[in-house]
Amino acid sequence: MMGKTPYSRILVYLDGSEGSMTAAMYAILLASASKAKLHAVYVVNTKALGDLVRSRIFVDQEKNEFLEDLKKDAGRHIRHTERLAASKDVEITASALEGSPHKEIISYIKSNKIDLLVLGQVNAIRSRRDELTSENDRMLRTSPCPVVVVRDTDDSIWQQFEEV
Amino acid sequence: MAFLEAIDKDLIKVPMTARNGKEAVEELVALYGSKNGLLPSETNEIVSAIMERERLGSTAMENGIAIPHAKIEGLKNASVMIGISRLGIDFGGSDASSIFFLVLAPAENPAEHIQILSSIAKVCSSDLFVRMLRSSKTKDDVYQLFFE
């Protein structure tokens, strides 16, 4: 086992937050150091969009606008992650999926034999209400593979990324 | 930023004194303006953005809850204002609205906007929670309901 890392396929989940970009940088550093294959996935949350229309919080026109906004956001974050990976000579498979984020990510992990999931910061537990559990929390709890949670307050990751 | 992180005790109003939908929006946006030191013209812009969205279709739900919202350019963090009206306010729904969640979210982060609205919708699907929220007498009661 000496010299061999316990993971060969890393997945980073992108959600459009600054925290997920820090997670992407950390995942790139991990992939570079371990020669693992890197995957990045952004999930356009069409499940939530549909729920918001059903509960009358969104009208159809607004849903369509947000769907476009989310697709653009996905494209922007995927392109940025690809550029970051290229800057460190790390090969990356990046894609945008649609659906319920935690379900899509768990399904992606299984179908692509991912053995490490990298997430941006999860929330502090401030409520016992299950309805308020975030997508990141759900992924952390249900992932079939080990999970690394990256704190977005950790400036050292940005520093490390610049230095490597 | 998640829904709970966008809740601030200073942005909760119990009871609301507004008599109509526009006043309800103004009353809640005033909390935000006061907390963030906005100029009257800035709060007016936010009110206009929300009322413009309402013209597309009311965000009043069937259970007396309204969730007016707007995406605001250049906003740093999302905010949720919560208001409870004793008498109920006509917000364009089939019943008067007595619980308001007013959501302001950065235009640059649509995913966050969706996540916050989705969390509100989920939490409001509990009849018990809605009853407790409606019977809250102070902003501390409201705050406590979310952070129990």
Image (cartoon, rainbow, N blue to C red):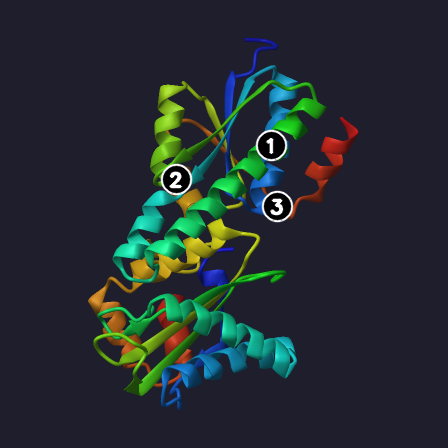
Residue B120 vs residue B23, the one in the foreground: B23
Q: Which mark is residue A79?
A: 1
Q: Residue at x 64, y 48 (%)?
A: A153
- Crowding at mark 1 (Cα within 10 Å: few <14, some 14-19, many 20+): some
Nearest to the eye among marks 3 and 2: give it. 2
Nearest to the eye among marks 1 and 2: give it. 1
Residue B19 vs residue A132, the one in the foreground: B19
Mark with earlier residue (3, 2): 2
Label 1, label 3: how far apart the Cα atoms are: 20 Å
Q: Residue at x 39, y 26 (%)?
A: A108
Mark with earlier residue (1, 2): 1
Q: Are marks 1 and 3 in contact (CB under 8 Å)?
A: no
* On screen, residue B124 above or below A45: below
Please name the amino acid that badge 2 sits on.
Pro
Chain that bears disc 3: A
Nearest to the eye among marks 1 and 3: give it. 1
